[in-house]
């Protein structure tokens, strides 16, 4: 009975932690980029909401500006696309944060994590790509003749 079963793994060394920190540098940069992108999306959503509130506030008897109310369905479509883009971006940020968490937990318990991290990274990039596609679709319908009139 000389062999003792070790229940808690040995704490990772400084070299192991340095390697893990090096491995999570790319996901950390991705997380920063996604956070900035989320800020851009929120700004765009706020502009769409402000415009819709302005249009809803126009009086029905304001004949010179009555044509602007026809823009409300387009604004709803833009808001829908931006909302879905925001959701995908937030999901991408969560998956990216999980990559970093999994990397450190696996280092702490000395568990192989390459496949899990790879799958999380692929999922994070796919959801971020979906977010970009929705933003591209929204940008395509964003500029309209009504937006160019003073």
Image (spheres, rainbow, N blue to C red):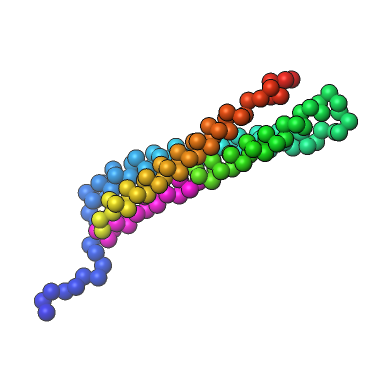
With respect to residue 44, does 19 lie above or below? below
Q: Closest to the observer: 17 or 45?
A: 45
Q: In this view, does 145 lie to the left or right of 32?
A: right
- Residue 142 visible: yes
Is residue 104 located in the magenta-colored stretch of the structure? yes
Q: In this view, does 100 lie to the left or right of 48?
A: left
Q: Position of residue 145 (x, y in %)?
A: 69, 22
Identify the residue shown where x is 11% and y is 79%: 1
Identify the residue shown where x is 48% and y is 48%: 91
Q: Position of residue 13 (x, y in %)?
A: 22, 54
Q: Position of residue 60 (x, y in %)?
A: 86, 33
Is residue 26 located in the magenta-colored stretch of the structure? no
Identify the residue shown where x is 61% and y is 29%: 141
Q: Main secondary structure of the magenta part?
A: helix
Identify the residue shown where x is 54% and y is 41%: 85
Q: In which quarter of the image is residue 26?
A: top left
Q: Where is residue 25 in the image (x, y as percent from the top left)?
A: 33, 41
Q: Closest to the observer: 46 or 18?
A: 46
| Residue range (magenta) | 90-110
Q: In which quarter of the image is residue 27?
A: top left
- Residue 100 visible: no
């Amino acid at each position: 009975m000389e062999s003792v079963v070790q229940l808690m793994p040995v704490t990772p060394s400084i070299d192991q932690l340095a390697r893990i920190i090096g491995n999570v540098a790319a996901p950390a940069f991705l997380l920063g980029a996604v956070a900035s992108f989320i800020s851009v999306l929120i700004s765009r959503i706020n502009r769409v909401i402000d415009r819709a509130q302005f249009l809803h506030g126009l009086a029905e008897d304001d004949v010179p500006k009555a044509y602007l109310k026809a823009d409300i369905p387009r604004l709803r479509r833009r808001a829908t696309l931006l909302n879905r883009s925001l959701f995908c971006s937030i999901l991408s940020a969560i998956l990216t944060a999980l990559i970093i968490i999994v990397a450190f937990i696996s280092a702490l318990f000395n568990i192989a994590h390459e496949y899990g991290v790879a799958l999380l990274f692929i999922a994070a990039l796919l959801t971020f790509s979906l977010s970009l596609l929705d933003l591209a679709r929204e940008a395509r319908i964003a500029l309209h003749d009504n937006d160019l009139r003073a």
